[in-house]
């Protein structure tokens, strides 16, 4: 990883090359355009190294400051126009098309990075006053404990476990995965693609929820409270329902739902849940256990919504491992209920058997189906 100043120098150099070789050239090469844009995309997915002089933590490659200082966004817009113009009269239209595709992806990624940064700054303005009003990850276990106490959170672990991330923020890949989740038409299981970090591939082979985020929410989950306003002990930021819904779920997922009852209620209502029972712990329980990251302060389901939508981050492996332990083929909740169904000689969908476990698994994106039950039988 390079430093922030080093990153600015790289972006400035690429901006100059794009201007000299593509925008201002009378006969630009489409292959050179594609080469430069691919180099820019590679730099855009990297992160900056920790700056020892300021003790700053690593950050995403693109920031509003870098966009302003290097003018790379404006140069990229001009490059896209130039590529489109030269494509019309070229006999290498396929190469120009490839360059144009990368340019469009970069512009979308730059816009998203800038929008996300502005949102974080807006949220920071409503931070709580505990720990001297410091926004971000707690500096120590004692500071984290003080946050939890000042926010009147339940502490499942005392002293609490620090949030995941090895002391630094979770790193978000700049580019969304373009491959949509695939669904097995027989089993209903979902399969997901890797992002830039291909080391996730082995875990993804066994990560197969069978309910989408939209299906979880529409079925009736979390007592209708998941997207309620919260103050996060992890980030020390106050989140509003509207802002979190905007950057977590797609509008079509929750269209026509009564948000105040199904999504943003501050009162847990068991009758909202599909199985009519209460399950799950408090936010303080999750936070004090070290399960909540700064990238997804609402928890696993927020991570799942964003993962389903194509976001990839450095917390993916941990979150998938959590799913495996609870709802995977050998997961404890999945195994418990399958054993109970088999012992009772019942059908998979018999809701009389362990409704609490069923509701819990629904929150993990899994419903017990005949396919799930048969897989368990074969494993035994």
Image (tube, helix red, strand yellow):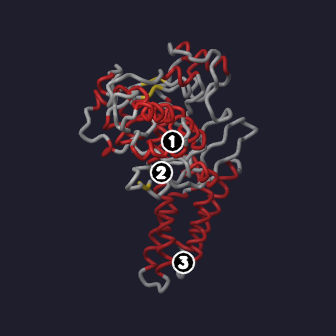
Q: Secondary structure at mark 1?
A: helix
Task: Report helix, strand or loop for mark 2.
Answer: loop
Count of numbered circles in the view:
3
Image coords of residue 183 (percent x, y): 41, 54
Quadrant of residue 366 within the rendered picture: top left
Q: Of the residues tagged 3 and 2, which is closer to the observer?
A: 2
**Residue 51 visible somewhere in the drawing:** yes
Asked if residue 107 is positioned above or below residue 261 in the image, the reply reads below
Viewer-nearest of labels 2 and 1? 2
Do the numbered discs 3 and 2 sit on residues whose CB atoms are within 8 Å? no
Residue 184 picture quarter? bottom left
Lateral position of residue 198 relative to residue 127, left or right: right
Mark before the other along the chain sequence, 2 or 1: 1
- Say if 27 sits above or below 37 in the image: below
Q: Which residue is mark 3?
A: 30
Whether label 2 touches label 1, CB < 8 Å: no
The residue carrying mark 2 is 310
**Which residue is label 1 attached to?**
117
């Amino acid at each position: 990883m390079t430093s922030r100043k080093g990153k600015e120098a790289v972006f400035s150099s690429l901006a100059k090359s794009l201007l000299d070789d593509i925008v201002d050239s009378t006969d630009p090469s489409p292959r050179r355009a594609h080469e430069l844009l691919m180099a820019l995309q590679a730099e855009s997915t990297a992160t900056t190294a920790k700056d020892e002089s300021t003790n700053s933590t690593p950050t995403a490659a693109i920031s509003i400051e870098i966009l302003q200082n290097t003018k790379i966004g404006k140069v990229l817009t001009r490059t896209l126009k130039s590529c489109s113009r030269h494509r019309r009269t070229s006999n290498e239209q396929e190469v120009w098309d490839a360059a144009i595709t990368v340019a469009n992806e970069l512009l979308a990624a730059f816009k998203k990075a800038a929008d996300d940064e502005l949102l974080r700054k807006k949220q920071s303005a409503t931070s709580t006053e505990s720990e001297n009003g410091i926004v971000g990850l707690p500096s120590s276990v004692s500071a984290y404990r003080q946050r939890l106490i000042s926010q009147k959170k339940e502490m499942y672990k005392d002293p609490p476990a620090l949030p995941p991330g090895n002391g630094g923020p979770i790193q978000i890949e700049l580019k969304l995965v373009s491959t949509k989740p695939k669904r097995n038409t027989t089993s209903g299981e979902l399969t997901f693609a890797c992002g830039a970090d291909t080391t996730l591939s082995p875990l993804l082979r066994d990560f197969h929820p069978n309910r989408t985020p939209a299906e979880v929410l529409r079925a009736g989950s979390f007592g209708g409270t998941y997207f309620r306003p919260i103050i996060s002990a992890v980030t020390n930021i106050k989140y509003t329902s509207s802002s979190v819904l905007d950057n977590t779920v797609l509008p079509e997922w929750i269209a026509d739902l009564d948000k105040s009852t199904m999504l943003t209620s501050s009162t847990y209502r068991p009758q909202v849940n599909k199985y009519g029972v209460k399950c799950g712990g408090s936010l303080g329980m999750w936070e004090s256990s070290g399960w909540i990251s700064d990238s997804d302060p609402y928890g696993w389901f927020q991570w799942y919504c964003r993962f389903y939508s194509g976001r990839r981050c450095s917390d993916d492996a941990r979150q998938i491992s959590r799913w495996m332990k609870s709802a995977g083929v050998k997961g404890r909740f999945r195994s418990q209920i399958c054993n109970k169904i088999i012992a009772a000689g019942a059908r998979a969908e018999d809701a009389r058997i362990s409704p609490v476990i069923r509701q819990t698994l629904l929150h993990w994106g899994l419903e017990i189906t005949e396919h799930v039950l048969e897989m368990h039988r074969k494993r035994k």
